[in-house]
Image (cartoon, helix red, strand yellow):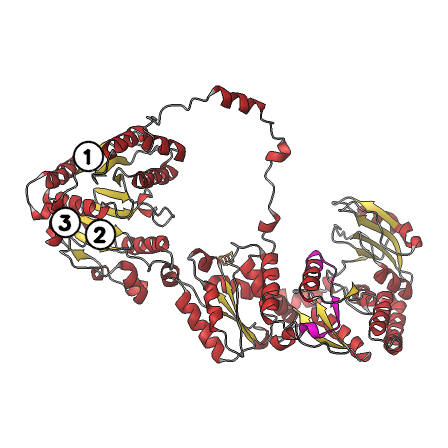
Amino acid sequence: MSRCKRELALYGKGGIGKSTICANLSAALAERGERVLQIGCDPKHDSTRMLMHGRALPTVLDYLKDVPKEAAVIDTVLGEGYRGIGCIEAGGPKPGVGCAGRGIISAFEFLERNKVKDKYDDVLYDVLGDVVCGGFAVPIRREYADTIFLVTSGEFMALYAANNILRGVRNFDGDRHRRVAGILYNRRNVAGEDRRVERFAEAVGLPVVATVPRSDAFAHAEEKKCTVVELGEAGPERDVFLKLADEVSRGLTLYEARPLSDEDLESVVLYGHRVSSSEEVVKTEEAVTAEAAAPVPTAEETAERPDPHRMPLYGCAFNGASTEAIHLTDAIVIAHAPRACAFYTWQNISSPGRRNLFNRGILMPSAISPNYECTDIGQTEAVFGGMDALRESVRLALERRPGAVIVISSCVSGIIGDDVLAVEDMSTPETPVIVIPADGDINGDYMTGIEMCMHTLAERIVDPAVPKRADCVNLIGETGVANNTDVNYRTVKSMLEGMGVTINCRFLGDATAEELRNLTAAPLNILAVDAPDNRKLRAWLEEKYSLTFYDGFLPVGNRETSEFLRNIAGFFGRPEAAEDVIAREKARYDAEAARLRRVLKGKKVIMTTINANLDWLLDAAEDVGLEFVWIGVLNYLRQEIKISDRPDRQAAVEEIGAFFSIRDRIRDLHPDIVISNYTAATDEGDYIVDNLPMGQLNGFRSGLEVMDRWARLLQTRREGEWMHDRALFEKYFA
Ligand code: SF4
């Protein structure tokens, strides 16, 4: 806490003369023997110039730009002016870049750390009042100013700014505190201004503490590079500040902030109505009648509904776009962000892969680290703008000649207003620079970021004029974070290649910029998974590039896979090509089913699941001799329950509620295998518990894959009793 006696904030519209008033008040207080510190909080940084006899001080923010916080010393920015007045200029960015409000916050943090206020009696803050973001409001936070003056002329915009300052004070104080000393009226000699200021003062319940006359004395003092007070010429210009200094020293009466509404302000200032802030608004008869006739909104209409666009899901749009962009394998992705955002996103991208490797006891290879870099936005960039850092990162990336440079903007770059799209001009004939203006979560959530990224990359890279190639397909919309995406890709690729069909481009699975450029060369496109976002993507690609899509998805299970292969082979005009692949895969399938049958034949399964087709699983169950005795279906969407194309399989189905307990079914049906996310597994009963994978395996083995796991669980339990292995436990814990 500071040990100074008073902290006074003088707020006013830019150009209204508040710096002149502030400097003269500082000088007058100093003449009365007070030790004074004046802090200029206007990016123009000329608040203390007359106190310093025309000498411009280095600003706090310019200084902190070059010197690390820990090494910074206050004396470099603290000037000593008239009568030992301490002078500091916070400074700010150049117009049009960065965030001046954040600059004020950074400067104040520095001043606090250095306890600069301790050796003064009075601290005066000279603050721009027409910029009303949180940074400029710092001096009116209660840990700073205990006394607030509104500096205004009689012009409407000056009074408008004064009223806004009252709103800011009200936000901090409510009606619990009184910190506003009143109005410092700076006359401009425009018609009717006295009456306007008087009406405003009356309406907001504040006194006009001082009226500063319009006078050449101020210009004269400025020529001499000092304040009117220092110049010492007798006159009302000097007297007004000395009198004000006396009042400040004696202690001023303080008032609570009672701002006007915009309508009242206009009617008071412009149209001369006298509206006292304590008066109640009197409604006209028509207004009362209209209000009574208005329909009363229902509870449903007034209830707050979540905006689906703003639902965070897995993260922000910056995060989603980054997760998608790194799939362009020869691109360099630049996160224009603080390092924390980039690190969080990098973790998000790399952890599913890392988890899988750790599960298998394999150390993480460097190749799993994505092609992801960061401009490392810090305090300097936040205040002065991050475009220099971004341009430098793009320049360095281009030197490495990647397939593309992709820039993704974060909240911070969005808030400080970096013109990120400008770096697209740095594109070279070989390498496009592509900006995804996600602006963190300002422009949407994780899924929005993914969509924004896919659309932007396609629009910038795909060349719709490339000629069609024979016998190739595109894979569209593979699942980003499932642990079997790559296994599925290899399965599908191998089956297609067995029929002489290649994969042209994975959109946007791992692909190079060149593959993406040739997207439209494939005569056929296959949507990997049936999901709402994928359907949307398909519609967009169809409309944008007239792509032809296979009428289905990557196949799951025996029947679907055979049908898929026959359809694709048929599309390319040689249906017989599918039969060889099907025969080869079927032989493998039969051999594995026979092996599993030896363990699983006659075993009973009960399962809870959602309302979706399960033929891929039930077909395989039949082939290995498993019996599904009960299937509880959670029917969230209240649609017709259909888990199979075969009517006889519906017999085992029962609709269940969301929090269904299957203990009763376990007790009554004595299953060997329980498949459920909702079971409360008990020690009683001789069964294993498992659940179905989120992403299914494509190809013939989809069902056998999960059954292989069940077989191993059954065998492990019987043979090992590993969970109760006393010898192993003693080895490590005894
Ligand atoms: S929401 Fe904003 S701050 Fe948070 S991770 Fe995303 S970009 Fe960074």
Give the Cα distance between marks 2 and 3: 15 Å
Q: Residue at x 45, y 58 (%)?
A: 412
**Residue 130: % across, % down:** 33, 46
- State the count of labels: 3
**Mark toward the viewer: 2 or 1:** 2
**Residue 36: % across, % down:** 17, 47
Query: Which residue, given by chain and number where applicable, does mark 1 sit on?
Result: 251
Q: Earlier in the sequence, mark 2 or mark 1?
A: 2
Read off the magenta span.
Answer: 519-535
Query: Which residue, given by chain and number where applicable, does mark 2 sit on?
Result: 47
Identify which amino acid the numbered label 3 is placed on: Ala
Q: Is mark 3 within 8 Å of ligand 1?
A: no
Observer-nearest of 408 and 175 = 408
**Tag on residue 219?**
3
**Mark toward the viewer: 1 or 3:** 3
| Residue 688 position (above or below residue 465) | above
